[in-house]
């Protein structure tokens, strides 16, 4: 019986190629800090300067800046990407986001229906005198 030994060149590629920019350097941290400051200062200016008069539009713009800032923090400070830990970090993040969306949507739905299904005659605009006159 002859032993057949195959020679394999194992080059594990963990995404540390030359084309990848490392965010764990001082330059990477400073870039992340700069982006975080800018992404905080712009919404602050939008609110304090009353640049957008419509509150709903302003809320959407601020939430958009907040979502972008979350991504900046994940990339520059938490060093998360689709390749880190074999993709498990991204899978855990997606699962967390799904749970948060379900929780928030369910909470808003319950609060809306509790408000719309209040007892007849009860309203938010009742004065103390009206409350005292209830049977």
Image (cartoon, rainbow, N blue to C red):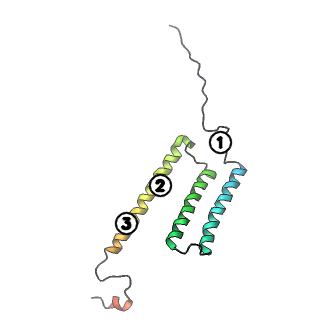
Callout 3: helix, strand or loop? helix
- Considering the image in quadrants, where does the C terminus appear? bottom left
Q: How many marks?
A: 3
The vertical placement of 128 against 69, above or below, is: below
* Residue topped by disc 3: 109
Would you say the residues marked 3 and 1 are in contact, meaning their CB atoms lie under 8 Å apart?
A: no
Q: Residue furthest top?
A: 1
Gap in Å between the C-alphas at discs 3 and 1?
Answer: 44 Å
* Residue topped by disc 2: 97
Measured from the top left, where is residue 99 in percent x and y?
43, 55
Callout 2: helix, strand or loop? helix
Gap in Å between the C-alphas at discs 2 and 1?
Answer: 27 Å
Residue at position x 61%, y 48% in the image: 79
Circle nearer the viewer, 2 or 1: 1
- Determine crowd level at label 1: few under 14, some 14-19, many 20+ residues with C-alpha closer than 10 A: few
Measured from the top left, where is residue 34 in percent x and y?
68, 59
* Residue topped by disc 1: 20
Residue at position x 62%, y 62% in the image: 39
- Determine crowd level at label 3: few under 14, some 14-19, many 20+ residues with C-alpha closer than 10 A: few
Would you say the residues marked 3 and 2 are in contact, meaning their CB atoms lie under 8 Å apart?
A: no
Circle nearer the viewer, 3 or 1: 1
Gap in Å between the C-alphas at discs 3 and 2?
Answer: 18 Å
Would you say the residues marked 2 and 1 are in contact, meaning their CB atoms lie under 8 Å apart?
A: no
Of residues 37 and 56, the one drawn nearer to the viewer in this rendering:
56
Indicate the quadrant where residue 106 lies: bottom left
Q: Which mark is residue 53?
A: none
């Amino acid at each position: 019986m002859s032993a057949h030994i195959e020679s394999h060149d194992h080059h594990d590629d963990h995404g540390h190629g030359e084309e990848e920019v490392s965010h764990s350097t001082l330059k990477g941290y400073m870039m992340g800090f700069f982006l975080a400051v800018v992404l905080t200062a712009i919404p602050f200016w939008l609110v304090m300067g009353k640049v957008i008069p419509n509150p709903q539009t302003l809320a959407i713009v601020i939430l958009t800046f907040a979502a972008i800032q979350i991504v900046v923090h994940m990339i520059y400070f938490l060093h998360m990407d689709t390749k880190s830990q074999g993709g498990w970090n991204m899978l855990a993040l997606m699962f967390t986001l799904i749970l948060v969306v379900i929780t928030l949507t369910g909470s808003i739905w319950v609060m809306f229906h509790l408000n719309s299904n209040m007892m007849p005659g009860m309203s938010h605009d009742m004065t103390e005198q009206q409350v005292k006159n209830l049977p």
